[in-house]
Amino acid sequence: MPVQQHTVIIGGSTGIGLATARQLLALGHRVTITGRTEQRLEAAKNELGGDLAVLVLDAADTDRLPNAFAGIGAFDHLVLSLGSGKGAGPFASVSLDEVRQGFEEKVFPHFATAQAALPSLRKDGSITFISAVTAQAAMPGTAGIGAANAAVAALVPILAAELRPLRVNGVSPGVIDTPWWDFLTDEQKAPVFADYAAKTPVGRVGQPQDVAQAIVFLIANSFIDGHVITCDGGLRLVG
Ligand SMILES: NC(=O)c1ccc[n+]([C@@H]2O[C@H](COP(=O)([O-])OP(=O)(O)OC[C@H]3O[C@@H](n4cnc5c(N)ncnc54)[C@H](OP(=O)(O)O)[C@@H]3O)[C@@H](O)[C@H]2O)c1
């Protein structure tokens, strides 16, 4: 009987993290998901069932992270699926405060969480970071948010080399229909998604399970290291 793997997903109560938890549970993993909102975590627990633990944790509260990981105990794989929408807007006018906030909400929590996880993470396990297509496509209006996502992607090859034999990979999603877009009303979202679907070579926006499949693949394949998979339906090719 194979040993059960334990995966911790930071930002696992909705969207891509939740879809990843669902797929890993179906594969027999034990999964711990974290998020800042207890209600969302409880809803996820009720929806997914299985061998799932939940933990209220703000990854931006970096001082709390070492104790939080000590409480979680030993695990095999870490997925970082929290993010920020801050820092988007035309370069000439985007507020530096917003750009700074984007880094505070994405780059530092990713960095600090991976750092704090190391003592409890299996030495030859894996970390999967989530960047974004804005880091690689030349999309006007994304300089701030793209720079934050590029910073996350930059960690991948460096940490893969430095933390060996731990594998460190990433996924760079395109436009994915998740609560990340809830800053728009449904009426606002529909034309934005229709526009992206028309522009995207595969003819649709992504679903969280599309990205979750890429994350699960990176966790499972023990010979892929230092790689960022773009999962964007080809959007980066057409910006
Ligand atoms: N959706 C897209 O179109 C898209 C495109 C490219 C990249 N991405 C990236 O994909 C990742 C996942 O996004 P998603 O689309 O799945 O968004 P989502 O549905 O909003 O999920 C974000 C998850 O992270 C949690 N979270 C946020 N801030 C946190 C913090 N400081 N500490 C702990 N948990 C936190 C959220 O729960 P709480 O709010 O309750 O904490 C939630 O569980 C993000 O890095 C995002 O930037 C998304």
Image (cartoon, rainbow, N blue to C red):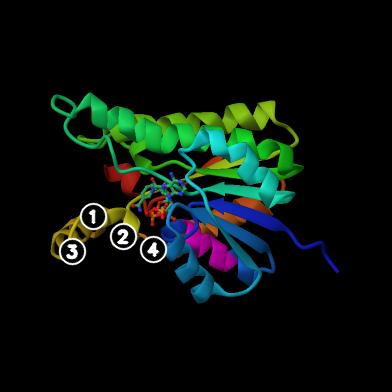
Residue 197's spot in the image, x, y percent? 25, 59
Marks 4/2: CA–CA distance: 7 Å
The vertical placement of 162 against 24, above or below, is above
Q: Earlier in the sequence, mark 4 or mark 3?
A: 3
Q: Nearer the viewer, residue 126 or 206?
A: 126
- The residue tagged 1 is 196
Left or right: 198 as drawn, with respect to 108 = left
Marks 4 and 1, the one that precedes in the sequence: 1
Q: Earlier in the sequence, mark 2 or mark 3?
A: 3
Q: Which mark is residue 229?
A: none
- Earlier along the polypeptide chain: callout 2 or callout 1? 1
Real-space Cα distance between discs 4 and 3?
Answer: 15 Å
Of 58 and 14, the residue lying toward us: 58
Identify the image quadrant of residue 168. Answer: top right
* Distance between mark 2 and mark 1 Cα atoms: 6 Å
Secondary element type, mark 2: loop
